Amino acid sequence: MSEIEIRYAKEQERSDHEHHVPTAGAMIGHITANLAMHALKIEQAALFAKGPAALFLDQYGRAWIQKELAFWDDINRALHAEADLVPTTSEELLKYSMLTENGATKYADGKDQLFELVKDFDMQLLFITRAIKLTEKEGHKAQNQLMKELYAWIKEQIGLTQSFLGHEPTEGLPSAAEDDGDDAE
């Protein structure tokens, strides 16, 4: 093996270890992977949704993508600054994303596509609240601040979209059933 292959193999060993511990960096790696995957899913819905959901996504979808990719960039830089591992390959993004995708979803009713995006936002909160606790524990202040900003932004998008769909803020969301009363802020 070449020196670069050896270094990458060591990085993969470290990554596996950190994901089993877990560390703040590993948890945040899931978040960046989720952001990248969610941006693709928003793009799909923005292109294929019909009806009122298409108008909603035309107004908000592009801004969501831009915001998620801006967070993705800022968070990756914060990971790198703390010497944490940064998922940078498509293989790593697919491995660490906890969001699922289905190409057939583009043919679903527009409101169903929009609600799938809301559920993905909600899934991201699970990892973000864990990352907030881990960054506090590990003293990673810049990462902690970014996690809190991302949490607040996602909660706002969930509320906005749920209102558009005629839902209560937590209606139909898995986190509402799992809420243990812990606040991330």
Image (tube, rainbow, N blue to C red):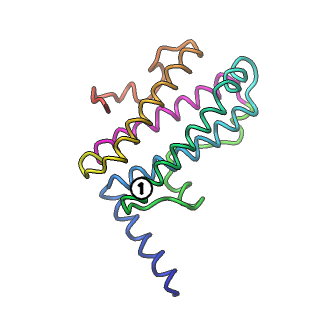
Residue at coordinates 75% horizontally, 34% vertically from top-left? 47
**Quadrant in which residue 58 is drawn:** top right
* Residue 89 coordinates in the image, percent (x, y): 57, 62
Q: Is residue 166 left or right of residue 12?
A: right
Residue reaching furthest to the left: 137
> Measured from the top left, where is residue 155 in percent x and y?
45, 27
As helix, strand or loop, the secondary structure at mark 1 comes to helix
Main SS category, magenta section? helix
Q: Is residue 51 left or right of residue 74?
A: right
Residue 184, percent from left and from top: 32, 33
Q: Is residue 12 magenta?
A: no
The residue stretch that appears in magenta: 108-134
Camera-side residue: 147 or 92? 147
Q: Position of residue 87 (x, y in %)?
A: 50, 59
Considering depth in this image, is 178 or 146 the residue closer to the camera?
A: 146
What type is the residue that disc 1 sits on? Leu
Give the labeled residue for mark 1.
Answer: 79
Work out whether residue 30 or residue 4 is closer to the camera in this orientation and state it: 4
Corner quadrant of residue 17: bottom left
Q: Please identify the quadrant where the C terminus is shown.
A: top left
142 versus 172 height, above or below: below
**Residue 180 appears left or right of 7:** left
Question: Is 47 located above or below residue 14 in the figure?
Answer: above
Q: How many labels sit on residues?
A: 1
Magenta segment includes 113: yes
Q: Residue furthest top?
A: 166
- Residue pictured at 70% horizontal, 42% vertical: 103
Structural crowding at the residue carrying mark 1, measured as other residues with C-alpha within 10 Å and reported as few (<14), some (14–19) or many (≥20): many
* Residue drawn where x is 41% and y is 55% of the image: 79
Q: Is 114 on the left or on the right of 52, as rendered?
A: left
